[in-house]
Image (cartoon, rainbow, N blue to C red):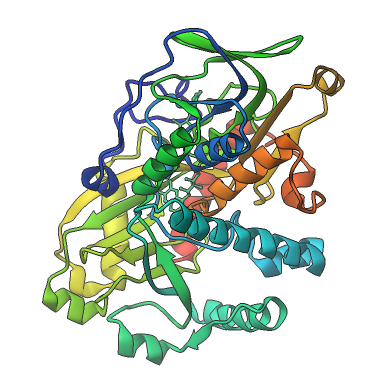
Amino acid sequence: MPYDPLVSHGVSPSLPLAESYWHATHKLETLPPLSKDISSDYLVIGGGYTGLSAAMTLAEASQQVALLDANSLGFGCAGRNGGFILSGSGRLSLSAIENRWGYAVAKGMQAEFDGAVNLLNQRIADFDMHVDLVKGPYLKLAHSPKQANLLCDSAKHHESQFNVASTLLSQEDLTSRFGIKGAFGGVEVNGACLHPLKLVSEYARVAKALGASLYYDSPATHIEKHKTGYVVTTPNGSVSAKHILIATNAYTPKRFHDAVDNKQFPVQSSIFVTAPMNEEQRAQTGLTAPMSFMDTRMMKYYYRVLPDGRLLFGGRGAVTGKGADNSSEKQRLYNAMVKSFPALNSIAMDYFWSGWVSVSLDSMPRIFVDNDASNNNIHRSGCTIAYAMGYCGSGVSFAAFAGQRLAQRMLGSCDVDLSLPLYCSPLKTYPFAKARRLALHGLYQWAKFAER
Ligand SMILES: Cc1cc2nc3c(=O)[nH]c(=O)nc-3n(C[C@H](O)[C@H](O)[C@H](O)COP(=O)(O)OP(=O)(O)OC[C@H]3O[C@@H](n4cnc5c(N)ncnc54)[C@H](O)[C@@H]3O)c2cc1C
């Protein structure tokens, strides 16, 4: 059965990798599991972008660091996402952040979001990373006339208040460029995409070269606090560490550690990739070169043209892990694509997979170093436990940035404004944890009618 964070006991080494286009086009190097008891100053739990980036930062600062992943590196979202490089994270736009926390905080958050994209580009250049980076337009499409007006107002506000330049597109502009149905206007900005699994490989290569010890197939099953640090148990060995960084995001087991239990809600997103479009399909859809799209629905559809001319199309997935691969889920997404691009009505679906994104209660991610609760003890003993998660489905650039910030916070070398909502408080606890799935199901039913 596919992994379900709210049902399964945790990610295990025996779970199969996602049957994704990314895994079909890139083979990860395998690494040995932890097979003895070791000690390390820092232990990172989770080998996605957050964890690998934290390990890179710590190793760059000449710290002793070990990293465990329960399966292979990139088993979670990092090996399953769409590869869109987005400036932002969480579910809140800069205007929404401004409304809630004020203009200064929104500017501070914008600096962090832009910093994330800059960090990614910088690392790709500095470490000569081969990640199939492609640039091309990124279009936000309004799915209703009302959303077209809102999108237009928001683009103007972002330009005047946050200096984000964009081009407004009318329905006619869109029709003349694309054979797309159901888009009532849009906004175009410069975009970029990459091969997400190759990025995992490149982070792993660099982290190892910098001196981090990485272990595959080594689930952390128990975290125990001792006087001078933590002991983390895995099936075939343990790690004694002074500092723990939890980077398991939506793949966090349902009972793991007080710092993260019930602090985020794993929600499934699914993607399929078509066969390469033929000349006629490319001409009829206007999808002739790498470019990416996202719509304005609450349950957004996102799609991009891959470098080999296939269309990658994603949207919300099933409510439970058990339902992830149901043919009805595949058909629902496929129908949504055909509704937008009638010319693709008989194109083959070559790949389909799903992954869990981590949704925080207030839609704001957190990069948090725990220093409350047993807190006094933590500080007296000089040990810390920290986490970064809750990116709500936007993490290709931001997760690695969060990993870097988390490591910097633990090293005491973070030069940012720690009063930003990202940093100053822990993730909020979900009330009525058991009812979350029911509420999500209700929301999907509502969206089916409201967002046709
Ligand atoms: C279908 C889909 C499409 C997406 N598309 C985009 C996109 O186009 N652009 C974008 O910006 N974002 C996208 N995202 C979100 C983005 O992929 C994530 O925000 C990002 O990858 C999170 O990285 P991470 O390292 O925090 O978590 P993950 O990559 O999920 O890593 C967590 C790791 O923790 C490991 N783990 C779990 N439990 C344990 C344990 N007990 N012990 C050891 N290891 C453990 C898991 O095996 C996993 O490898 C998408 C997500 C999904 C699911």
Please tell me which residue is depicted at 32% across the width and 20% down the height of the picture: 14
| Quadrant into which the N terminus falls | top left
Asked if 239 appears above or below 351 in the picture, the reply is above
Asked if 411 appears above or below 31 in the picture, the reply is below
Asked if 234 appears above or below 409 in the picture, the reply is above
Q: Position of residue 25 (x, y in %)?
A: 22, 48
Q: Position of residue 77 (x, y in %)?
A: 43, 42
Please tell me which residue is depicted at 70% across the width and 60% down the height of the picture: 109
Q: Is residue 427 visible?
A: no
Q: Is residue 129 left or right of residue 255?
A: left
Q: Is residue 299 left or right of residue 150?
A: left
Q: How many marks?
A: 0
| Quadrant into which the C terminus falls | bottom left
Q: Is residue 168 visible?
A: yes
Q: Position of residue 234 (x, y in %)?
A: 49, 13
Q: Position of residue 264 (x, y in %)?
A: 61, 38
Please tell me which residue is depicted at 35% across the width and 25% down the height of the picture: 31
- Residues 405 and 19: in front is 405
